[in-house]
Amino acid sequence: MLIRETSKENYSESIADLIMATLGSARSVHQFRSILFERKLKRYKKESVRVALSRLHSKRYIEKSTSGWLITKKGKSHAENIRLLCYIKSPFKEKTLSNMIISFDIPEKNRIVRNWLRNQIKIFGYKMLQQSLWIGPGPFPLSFLKRLEDLNIRKNIKIFKISTKK
């Protein structure tokens, strides 16, 4: 299953997300069905599940085979994108000293990723100085830096450490 690193208040799992996660993690159709119907999807109406499966199929994220539903390459890519846009818990305590500045220039065509970055650094406790210039605690966790690489936006970001002259 996809594990979301965000609180339940910020993210409401949809049926489609659940189906994609289950298809991506199940080793067999039998395992898929047991996970899908005996656990999480039990709380949804069967018609809602059918509609979600139909939508995923029309977007070509899943396909029907003789043995059941299978996730496609496009579906795996979509599930990976969902995972990449999950939020990382802040490792910083409240009122931690602001010793880092982050500046970014992410194009409008990557609006979703840019909004994710803004929200993520807010979670870390950063405050906006100007539109794409933020100040907050540091250093950033390695998982965050890795995520920037995975999203292919690290080249659009500059990180500065603030220090006092002695």
Image (tube, helix red, strand yellow):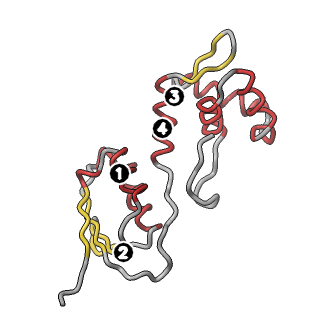
Q: Is tag 2's residue or tag 3's residue first in the polypeptide sequence?
A: 3
The label number, if any, that marks residue 136 in the structure image: 2
For the residue marked with disc 4, what is the amino acid? Glu
Are the residues tagged 3 and 1 within 8 Å (C-beta)? no
The residue wearing badge 1 is 148
Q: Which of marks 3 and 4 is in front?
A: 4
The residue wearing badge 3 is 75
Q: Is tag 1's residue or tag 2's residue first in the polypeptide sequence?
A: 2
Q: Is mark 1 on a helix, strand or loop?
A: helix
Q: Is tag 3's residue or tag 4's residue first in the polypeptide sequence?
A: 3
- Answer above or below: position of 67 versus 116: above
Tell which of 20 and 132 is nearer to you.
20
Q: In this view, does 65 lie to the left or right of 147?
A: right
The residue wearing badge 4 is 80
Distance of mark 2 from mark 4, alpha carbons?
29 Å
For the residue marked with disc 3, what is the amino acid? Gly
Q: Is mark 4 on a helix, strand or loop?
A: helix
User: Which residue is rendered at x = 72% and y = 31% of the image?
Assistant: 49
Distance of mark 3 from mark 1, alpha carbons?
22 Å
Task: Name the quadrant of the N terminus.
Answer: top right
- Answer above or below: position of 73 versus 135: above
Q: Which of marks 3 and 1 is in front?
A: 1
